[in-house]
Image: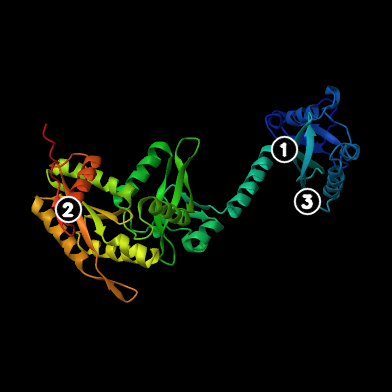
Amino acid sequence: MHKGCPENHCCDAFNISVLNSLALGIAVLDAQGIIVTTNLAWRRFAGECGMPEPERDMAGMDYLDVCAQALHHPHGENAADVRTGVAAVLSGTQAEFNLDYPCSIQSKPRWCHLRIFRLQGAQSGAVVTHEDITERKRAEERMREALVVFNAVHTAIMTTDAAGIITSVNPAFSAITGYEPEEVVGRNPSLLKSGRHDVAYYRNMRDTLAATGRWEAEIWNRRKNGDIYPQWQSVTAVRDDSGNIVEYVAVFSDITERKLHEEIIWRQANFDALTGLANRNLLRDRIEQALAQARRSGEKVGVIFLDLDGFKEINDTLGHDAGDELLVEVSLRLKSCVRGPDTVARMGGDEFTIVAPGMNDAEDLRAIGEKLVNVLREAFTLSDTRYAISGSIGIAIFPDHGEDVSTLLKNADIAMYQSKQAGKNCCSFYTCPRQPEA
């Protein structure tokens, strides 16, 4: 029992040792609002607020006067509310009073919670509890900020429990997928699957999450309306203090526009704008791939170089528009002559190249070459007038006429000029030029 504590007052109902073991600051008031006793946590708080050591016990002080004095301190406007609440509880007009209020402790901003309630039993009076709730307030503020971000960002957010059941989604999720929260919460995210990924893909996702706690990749999913679209998605595993996974947070964005932009850039870099055929860059890549495969399989690869005969005259006479029209028609005819794995490319001007992988012998290539010659012999209609051109074709074979891209292209070009020297409108295989005799 505290020194000076009047006999027969409510402090007899409390075990002082129990009060002092509590982290919650406690003060006991009699029916007139006089402080009967306080615990260690209360006195510690009083000291942090700058109260001198002898006064921290506060026994015998009128709590209403303490509140009145606090009116002159920073944040003192809350003291008036406390005074009113204490008076209401002591008078019996109010059973309990609660207040969260800001204060400054050792020049640091804090938040506290004050609760005042009547004593139960024969003795009248009240108990005042005081708790530092700064961390709780900060957590609430972080939660509010997170909720604002959750609802405001244009990136979709989806949370699931440890079993993978959806627990929440944000507005961006609904905007991207077409699903409202009530349509997906409580369900498995598998309802978003597009069907484009196999079992191994999702197994890798799970294994990576289990091993590292995070997975990030491009993934194709399905909207509510059935559209399949690409996402960039990251999934993070949330663990408790024991290290157990309690939640997953998935964040994703719709990258359809980005993929389309990348596709446009890739096509511009790899395809001829006029004809839609592969360009020189893509052709070299296709030849490299064909050679790598041929080295493994032992098959041959044909590189066919074609130059149009008579194109310059038409282009000069009828103009570039007619020339472009002719080149487009030529490209269509060339594509009609080749197989699925073959690649037709426009090298520039009126020059075209075809790479034919997986060939067994030279006669297969000769058949393709003759077919190309024949299809170009047929007249072309430009502005309702028929015009005749032809093609000079040269063929180089891997590995007979070269084992790398540059050599094969060079030797196919040489073979094409051999066709022109032979009178044009024909097909020639590369033959090593004769060395002049000494």
Out of 20 and 306, give the one closest to the viewer: 306
Please name whichever residue, 78 or 121, is drawn nearer the observer in this view of the structure: 78
**Residue 335 pos. (x, y %):** 24, 61
Q: Is residue 281 left or right of residue 58?
A: left
Can you tell which of label 1 and label 3 is closer to the viewer? 1
Amino acid type indicated by mark 2 = Ser
Q: Nearer the viewer, residue 13 or 233?
A: 233
Q: Is residue 339 left or right of residue 280?
A: left
Image x and y of residue 261, in percent: 45, 54
State which tag comes first along the sequence, 1 or 3: 3
**Mark 1 — residue?**
131
Name above or below for residue 59 compared with residue 203.
Answer: above
Task: Give neighbour class at mark 2: few <14, some 14-19, many 20+ (Cα, 10 Å).
Answer: many
Residue at (45% x, 46% y) in the render: 235
Quadrant of the rendered structure where residue 325 is? bottom left
Q: Which residue is mark 3?
A: 95
- Quarter of the image for the N terminus: give it: top right
Q: Is residue 260 visible?
A: yes
Question: Where is residue 197 drawn, in percent x and y?
Answer: 33, 53
Residue 418 lies left or right of residue 238; in this view the side is: left
Q: Quadrant of residue 385 in the image?
A: bottom left
Amino acid type at mark 1: Glu
Identify which residue is drawn at 51% across, 57% down. Answer: 173
Q: Are marks 1 and 3 in contact (CB under 8 Å)?
A: no
Mark 1 burial class by Cα count in 10 Å: few <14, some 14-19, many 20+:
some
The first of marks 2 and 3 along the sequence is 3
Q: Which residue is mark 2?
A: 419
Residue occupying the point 12% across, 43% down: 298
Q: Report, in whole angstroms, how far the alpha carbon at label 1 lies from the one at label 3.
A: 19 Å
Residue 118: in sight, yes or no? no
Amino acid type, label 3: Ala
